[in-house]
Image (spheres, rainbow, N blue to C red):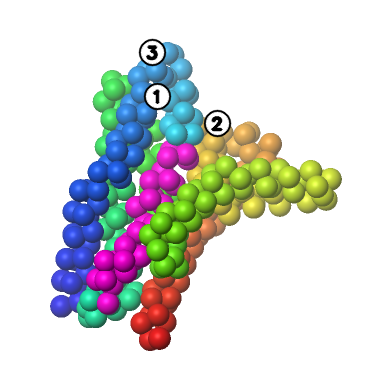
Amino acid sequence: MMLRVANALMLNEWLERIRDRWVLVISGLFALLACGVTLYGSGLSSQSTLLIGPSLVTLAALFVPLVALTLGHDAIVGERERNTLGLLLSLPIGPGGLVFAKFTGRFMVLACALVVGLGGTVFFSMGRGWSIVPRLLLDTLMMGAGFLSVGMLLSVIAKRQITAASLAITVWFLFVFFYDLGLLGLMVVTDGAVSSEVIAYLVLLNPAGLFRVRMMTYFGGSGLMEGLGLTEIPVPLLTWVVWGLWILLPIIASGLLLFRGRAE
């Protein structure tokens, strides 16, 4: 019974998000830009992969967090404003199951958009860039799942949908633009007291930073890590743990907050 209810909620979330034109516009824009980057890189046949890969990484690091946060920001607060949250909380799956079902349904939409966008790069590059797509897609999905989970948490915390949207944009700017600038400022203010290796590990705590570093290592080799104070990326298992925590902790916190709110 619980499994059927959860599956029904996932399917409903997927269908509703597909009908959300604004999200589709953002996802379509990502696909068009990805294909545009691929077409431009394909013109340089001798360096197509070297150009396409880093360009897609930069594009994904900017757009995917925004799309993921947008997908998640109204998951709970939207139901609250429509006065349907109480009905959903009365379902046998509980608050945690509700959050997980909504997260899974919206993640499927994000995954579809990324598969279409990045899959188009293979078609438009005449197959020249196919080798980079699986690795790029996997890491992009992990980054997107992390930001989607954060968006879900913002949706639980916010009392109004406009507040959740404002928080989502703020988080996007903070992690995509200002986080690295803050670390650079920390190095300047401390006059080198904070080692570059510590700064490098702090970069890896940011899902967007972790995504960029992993992709830099993949496309440019370990030599690019020396500028960050690391001779190589930390134990791969550690990077997956960081991403796993970014996905699981906000989901767990969202479920607990919903449970506490229902108890009150």
* Picture residue at 29% right of the left edge, 38% below the top: 25
Residue 230 location in percent, x, y? Answer: 67, 44
Q: Residue at x 71, y 52 (%)?
A: 198
Q: Is residue 55 above or below residue 225?
A: above
Q: CA distance from mark 1 to mark 2?
A: 18 Å
Q: Which of the two labelled residues, at mark 1 and mark 2, occupies the earlier sequence position?
A: 1
**Residue 37: mark in rendering:** 1
Which range is magenta? Answer: 60-86
Question: Which quadrant holds residue 95?
Answer: bottom left
Q: Regarding mark 1 in the picture, which secondary structure is present there?
A: helix
Q: Main secondary structure of the magenta part?
A: helix
Callout 3 amino acid: Gly
Q: Is residue 213 above or below residue 95?
A: above
The residue lying toward the viewer, choosing from 212 and 60, is: 60
Residue on which the image places disc 2:
220
**Residue tagged by mark 3?**
43
Task: Please state which of the two labelled residues, at mark 1 or mark 3, is closer to the viewer.
Answer: 1
Residue type marked 1: Val
